[in-house]
Image (cartoon, rainbow, N blue to C red):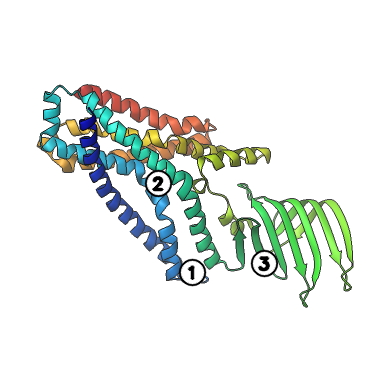
């Protein structure tokens, strides 16, 4: 079986890499064309576009892994079927289930690669990509990893530690200067929520005022209002996105959001999708097997490839659609992530039993 495992793995891996190259090239080209629409906004030039597109390639690889595995398995097994190699294997006493197990081994190996990319590469490159884009398009706003978000608001400089999913702010510092660039006031607030008309309601406020001789006077209050040109729409671009975090950091961030009474369902769904990625990738390769055994010799590889693409698209729509439905209907995020996988697993087992 070891020789068989290696042979099947090599064949599937070759065609998986071919599918990977085609899909990645297509998605990268579409991403590049999409970014050209913002060319010239602020200082967002062609160099920034290319840098952004290159930095988003790891995320594309990560998202394409299930589809790539499905197409690679279909193409590889279809070639083996057309060359009668699968028929020879079965005539030698090797069952469909043994062939399926060999396919699943390479599936889990590919899933491990995807998991490593999602955990250690995507969070860094995606953050760098978003920072490249936003810094070029909104030069008055700078985000630093260690010090939070820095914003210039007229004669004031604002430091925001965190933008929460409901677009409220945590730990805000406002440094206000006069026309001669002398510090006039420093305002610290534990939290801020947008009201209306460019007005924010501040909580836990500590204000330090400086006169012309730079003598300080401190004032504290539970509530205050802050008028600023900043709006939630401007700050929404700096929200932490689920696909920017590893599973470990997602778990920590979910606890942090729960402590701050925030809705965590979207982040929990992203967490379970990441955890289930190895199973999803292996599942895509598993359901390719029945379709390959259903008459590739008579219908050709094109038919199997078309079926594979349709299967991948259907799974993608069901997975994303049911995940969104679960959030709206308050279904536990674990079920929102796992039910589509479970449904396709049952379909795969039923189809495999018919050809075994």
Depth check, mark 2 against mark 3: the one in front is 2
Q: Quadrant of residue 92?
A: top left
Residue at (55%, 32%) from the top-left corner? 330
For the residues marked 3 and 1, what is the alpha-carbon distance in whole angstroms? 19 Å
Residues packed near mark 1 inside 10 Å, few (<14), some (14 to 19) or many (20 plus)? many
Q: Seen in the image, is 150 located left or right of residue 26?
A: right
Depth check, mark 1 against mark 2: the one in front is 2
The residue singled out by tag 3 in the image is: 152
Task: Work out whether 272 lies above or below 228.
Answer: above
The residue singled out by tag 2 in the image is: 62
Q: Is the Cβ of the residue at disc 1 closer than 8 Å to that at disc 2?
A: no
Residue at (40%, 59%) from the top-left corner? 54
Mark 3 or mark 1: name the one nearer the start of the chain: 1
Q: Is the Cβ of the residue at disc 3 closer than 8 Å to that at disc 1?
A: no
Instruction: Indicate the position of residue 286 as horizontal and vertical percent values.
Output: 29, 31
Residue at (56%, 42%) from the top-left corner? 249
Mark 2 or mark 3: name the one nearer the start of the chain: 2
Closest to the observer, 237 or 93: 93
Mark 1 or mark 2: name the one nearer the start of the chain: 1
Residues packed near mark 2 inside 10 Å, few (<14), some (14 to 19) or many (20 plus)? many
Q: SS at mark 2? A: helix
Task: Work out whether 240 lies above or below 180.
Answer: above
Q: SS at mark 3? A: strand
Q: Quadrant of residue 197?
A: bottom right
Q: Residue furthest bottom?
A: 180
Residue at (32%, 36%) from the top-left corner? 107
The numbered disc on residue 44 is: 1
């Amino acid at each position: 079986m070891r020789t068989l495992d290696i042979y099947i793995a090599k064949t599937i891996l070759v065609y998986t890499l071919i599918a990977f190259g085609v899909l990645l090239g297509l998605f990268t080209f579409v991403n590049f064309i999409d970014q050209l629409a913002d060319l010239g906004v602020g200082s967002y030039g062609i160099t920034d576009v290319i840098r952004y597109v290159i930095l988003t390639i790891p995320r594309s690889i990560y998202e394409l892994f299930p589809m790539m595995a499905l197409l690679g398995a279909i193409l590889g097994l279809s070639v083996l079927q057309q060359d009668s190699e699968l028929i020879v294997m079965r005539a030698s006493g090797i069952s469909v289930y043994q062939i399926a197990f060999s396919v699943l081994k390479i599936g889990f190996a590919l899933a491990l690669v995807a998991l490593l990319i999602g955990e250690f590469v995507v969070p860094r490159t995606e953050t760098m990509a978003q920072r490249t884009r936003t810094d070029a398009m909104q030069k008055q706003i700078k985000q630093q990893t260690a010090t939070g978000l820095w914003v210039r608001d007229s004669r004031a400089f604002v430091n925001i530690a965190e933008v929460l999913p409901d677009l409220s702010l945590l730990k805000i510092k406002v440094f206000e200067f006069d026309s001669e660039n002398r510090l006039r006031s420093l305002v610290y607030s534990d939290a801020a929520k947008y009201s209306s008309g460019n007005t924010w309601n501040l909580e836990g406020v500590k204000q330090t005022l400086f006169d012309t001789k730079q003598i300080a006077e401190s004032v504290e209050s539970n509530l205050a209002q802050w008028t600023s040109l900043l709006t939630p729409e401007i700050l929404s671009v700096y929200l932490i996105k689920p696909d920017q975090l590893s599973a470990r950091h997602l778990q920590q961030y979910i606890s942090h959001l729960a402590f701050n009474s925030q809705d965590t369902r979207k982040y929990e769904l992203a967490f379970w999708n990441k955890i289930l990625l190895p199973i999803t990738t292996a599942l895509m390769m598993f359901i390719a097997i029945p379709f390959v055994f259903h008459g590739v010799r008579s219908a050709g590889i094109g038919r199997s490839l078309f079926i594979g693409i349709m299967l991948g698209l259907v799974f993608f729509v069901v997975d994303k659609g049911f995940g969104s439905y679960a959030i709206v209907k308050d279904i536990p995020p674990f079920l929102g992530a796992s039910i589509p996988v479970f449904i396709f697993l049952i379909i795969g087992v039923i189809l495999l039993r018919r050809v075994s």
